[in-house]
Image (cartoon, rainbow, N blue to C red):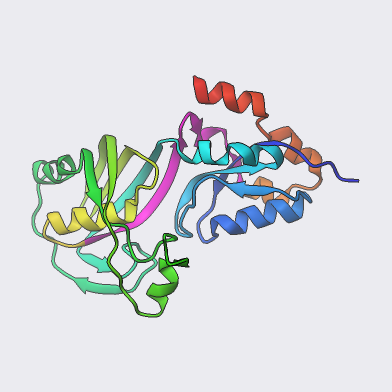
């Protein structure tokens, strides 16, 4: 009989796969009944995906509540219906000659606490129906703004029409919407063209299992070697 394990698995999610794809893979490959994830990453996004296995699912909500760190790329001059590179281009505009101080000033506008309107293409539910399903039907509904916070930001590179950045933000923050709103503020429109989650709470991408290694793994022993135990989860969260 294959043992049912308990713990946290950090995975470096590749592009093109959903968070559910990774959960389903681990469940089937290692024959584990209880596997969940601690915060969805969009299919085009990469980076830290935290999977809870067995009794670790009991702390799933606590882990999801942690602040997050992302590295992303804003592409100016194009808005899309999903606010990211996976969507249909709605409008293209010339990018004005923006200098670094102007871009810095736009980022500064979104430092600290502010209200953010979630995108239609999201898993938020309206009367039990995820918004992305309504969006597929061509429907748009009013979404109440949510209070979010950016504790730190850093502009990593400006190579117009793209701007690379790093942010440390609260849970429930939509980086896609952040890019869309920055593009609007800069007068060019914009969308998120790339995103990597680098940290969640005190858990780091550098400690994650690479997807090619996970995909090639055989046997539950591999999973057991890479799981963070329940006591270790508590210790890392407190550090």
What residue occupies the far front of the structure in this picture? 127
Please tell me which residue lies in front, 38 or 88: 38
Q: Is residue 185 left or right of residue 16?
A: left
Residue at 11%, 59% in the rendered image: 187
Question: Would you identify the image quadrant in which residue 135 lies?
Answer: bottom left
Residue 161 seen by the camera: no
In the rendered structure, which segment of residues is drawn in magenta? 190-210
Instruction: Give the image location of residue 194, x and y in percent.
Output: 37, 54
Q: Most extreme residue toward the bottom, as rendered?
A: 137
Question: Residue at left 45%, top 59%?
Answer: 44
Does any portion of residue 154 appear in the rendered image? Answer: yes
Q: Main secondary structure of the magenta part?
A: strand
Left or right: 122 in relation to 190: right
Residue 215 location (% of width, % of height): 68, 52
> Residue 128, image x and y in percent?
47, 66
Membership of 191 in magenta stretch: yes
Magenta-drawn stretch contains 219: no
Q: x, y percentage for residue 25?
A: 68, 56
Q: Is residue 172 shown above or below 123? A: above
* Residue at x-position 61% and y-position 59%: 21
């Amino acid at each position: 009989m294959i043992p049912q394990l308990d713990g946290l698995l950090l995975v470096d999610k590749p592009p093109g796969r959903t968070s559910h794809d990774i959960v389903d893979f681990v469940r089937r490959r290692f024959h584990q009944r209880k596997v969940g994830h601690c915060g969805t990453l969009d299919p085009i996004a990469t980076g830290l995906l935290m999977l809870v296995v067995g009794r670790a699912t009991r702390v799933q909500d606590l882990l999801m509540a942690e602040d997050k760190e992302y590295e992303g790329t804003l592409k100016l001059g194009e808005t899309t219906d999903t606010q990211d590179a996976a969507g249909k281009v709605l409008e293209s505009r010339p990018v004005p000659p923006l200098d670094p101080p102007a871009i810095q000033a736009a980022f500064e506008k979104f430092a600290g606490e502010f209200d953010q309107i979630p995108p239609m293409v999201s898993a938020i539910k309206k009367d039990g129906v995820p918004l992305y399903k309504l969006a597929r039907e061509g429907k748009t509904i009013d979404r109440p703004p949510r209070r979010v916070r950016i504790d730190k930001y850093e502009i990593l590179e400006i190579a117009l029409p793209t701007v690379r950045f790093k942010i440390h933000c609260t849970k429930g923050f939509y980086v896609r919407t952040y890019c869309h709103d920055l593009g609007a503020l800069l007068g060019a429109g914009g969308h998120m063209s790339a995103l990597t989650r680098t940290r969640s709470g005190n858990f780091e991408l550098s400690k994650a299992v690479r997807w090619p290694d996970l995909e090639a793994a055989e046997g539950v022993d591999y999973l057991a070697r890479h799981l963070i135990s329940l006591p270790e989860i508590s210790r890392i969260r407190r550090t």
